[in-house]
Image: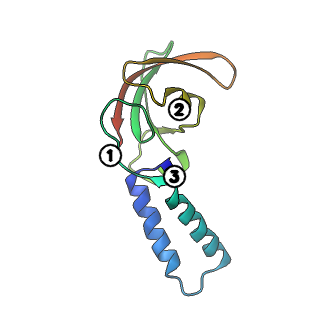
Amino acid sequence: MTWIPPAVLATLTEELAHLTDLPSPSNTELERTREVRRLLRSAEATIKPDDGLVEPGMRITARLAGETRATVFLLGDRNLSALDPNVTVDVYSPTSPLGSAIIGSYVGDVISYTTPSGSQMTVEILAAAPYTG
């Protein structure tokens, strides 16, 4: 499953309705119909519980080692989240090195992970709140 903002789910659902109502869709429109159906089959757009668990669909506040300022980001699909104009923070993929390292952690946890360059990085989870749009 891929977490997407609820507004994106609505947008994709409307797009699919439009595409399937076309009387004579072009090859491009048929391909887009297949793509939207695939996206919708794997989409999860629920609002997560506010329990401090880091998972896709959460707005995370974290501090990287050596930084004085915290970083705020949404954990989700970057390309699909870009379809929601209300997403005003960076989006980090759950499959990125940082994303995969912090999934399953809780507020207050300090996690170490290896960056793509091979160096060790430490991050502290300061907050994890459900993204509500």
The residues bearing labels 2 and 1 have C-alpha atoms spaced at a distance of 19 Å
Extreme residue toward the left, this view:
50
Mark 3 / mark 2, whichever is N-terminal: 3
Residue 54 vertical placement versus 6 (above, below) = above
Three-letter residue code for mark 3: Leu
Tell me which residue sits at (54%, 87%) in the image: 23
List x then y, in percent, for residue 4: 45, 50
Residue beneath the point at 65% across and 16% down: 119
Q: Residues within 10 Å of mark 2 (few under 14, many from 20)?
A: many
Residue at the extreme right: 117
Amino acid bearing label 2? Gly
Under circle 3, the secondary element is helix
Q: Is residue 107 above or below residue 85?
A: above
Looking at the image, which residue is at 69% across and 19% down? Answer: 118
Q: What residue is shown with label 3? A: 80
User: Which residue lies at the image location 49% right of the left edge and 81% below the top edge?
Assistant: 21
- First in sequence: mark 1 vs mark 3: 3
Numbered disc 1: secondary structure: loop
Residue 19 percent across, percent down from the top left = 52, 75
Using the rendered view, name the quadrant where residue 130 is placed.
Answer: top left
Mark 3 nearby-residue class (10 Å; few <14, some 14–19, many ≥20): some
Q: Are marks 1 and 3 in contact (CB under 8 Å)?
A: no
Query: Residue 27's spot in the image, x, y percent?
Result: 67, 76
Instruction: Name the residue furthest top.
Output: 66
Residue 46 percent coordinates (x, y): 37, 49
Q: According to the image, label 1 marks what residue?
A: 132
Which callout, 2 or 1, points at the residue further toward the start of the chain?
A: 2
Residue where numbered disc 2 is placed: 99
Q: Is residue 63 left or right of residue 114?
A: left
Q: The disc labelled 1 sits on which kind of residue?
A: Thr
- The relative height of residue 54 versus residue 1 in the rendered view (above or below) is above
